[in-house]
């Protein structure tokens, strides 16, 4: 955070979920602790840690957060559950979402990538891809490989920026 001059960030030992609860986080057995998950899969070793999980809507309301521009989400199959807990936050702030979609990882949670896409479409989000040059490009769900980083942009924000650029 300091290297990138991010001063308005807070690190919390919490999980975002669709309810306020406690979850068993199953730790990764390899060197990449980022593969730890609440869903069992091949890269985990069975050691667990109990983590507090909160609805993002409740958390941001309690913390009196007045602005959210960007959310990065790579949470090993729990993306839909976290997004469900952020529904009001997404409606209010319309942040850019950067989400990893992996069919193999999602399969561990019995969630399909199309469920995430459909949920976000209901909130007026459009899915976009990122090309090799880092540009945001059109992307169809059929074009998503086994694991893909995608961007979701709120269509109201897209329209607002388009109207501003044409004036």
Image (cartoon, rainbow, N blue to C red):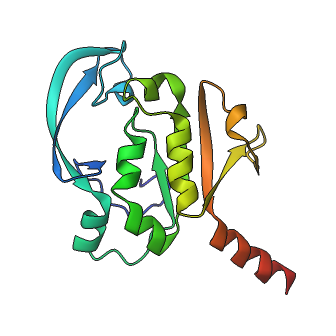
| 46 to 97, vertically: above or below | above
Location of residue 99 in the rendering, given as x and y in whole percent from the top left corner:
53, 44
| 76 to 151, vertically: above or below | above
The quarter of the picture where the C terminus appears is: bottom right
| 107 to 96, vertically: above or below | above
> Which residue is farthest bottom?
167
Q: Is residue 103 left or right of residue 89?
A: right
- Residue at 72% x, 33% y is 143
How many numbered tags mark residues here?
Answer: 0
| 149 to 3, vertically: above or below | above
- Residue at 62% x, 50% y is 151
Location of residue 39 in the rendering, given as x and y in whole percent from the top left corner:
30, 26
Q: Is residue 88 left or right of residue 62?
A: right
Task: Compare residues 38 and 9 and report the one nearer the observer.
Answer: 38
> Which residue is farthest right?
166
Task: Compare residues 69 and 76 and report the one nearer the observer.
Answer: 76
- Residue at 51% x, 60% y is 70
- Residue at 43% x, 33% y is 111
Report whether residue 34 is seen: yes
Location of residue 47 in the rendering, given as x and y in whole percent from the top left corner:
17, 19
Kindly indicate the quadrant of the structure image that contains residue 144. Answer: top right
Report whether residue 8 is seen: no
Task: Compare residues 6 and 94 and report the one nearer the observer.
Answer: 94
Location of residue 161 in the rendering, given as x and y in whole percent from the top left corner:
73, 75
């Amino acid at each position: 955070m300091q290297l990138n001059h991010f001063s308005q960030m807070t690190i919390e030992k919490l999980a975002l979920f669709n309810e306020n609860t406690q979850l068993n986080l199953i730790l990764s057995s390899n060197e990449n602790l980022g593969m730890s998950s609440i869903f069992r899969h091949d890269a985990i070793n069975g050691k667990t840690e109990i983590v507090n999980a909160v609805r993002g809507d409740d958390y941001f309301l309690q913390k009196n957060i007045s602005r959210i521009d960007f959310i990065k989400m790579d949470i090993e199959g729990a993306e839909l559950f976290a997004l469900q807990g952020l529904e009001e936050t997404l409606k209010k702030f319309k942040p850019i979402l950067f989400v990893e979609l992996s069919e193999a990882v999602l399969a561990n949670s019995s969630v399909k990538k199309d469920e995430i896409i459909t949920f976000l479409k209901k909130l007026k989000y459009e899915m976009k891809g990122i090309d090799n040059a880092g540009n945001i490009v059109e992307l169809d769900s059929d074009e998503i490989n086994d694991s893909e980083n995608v961007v979701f942009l709120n269509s109201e924000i897209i329209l607002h920026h388009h109207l501003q650029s044409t004036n």
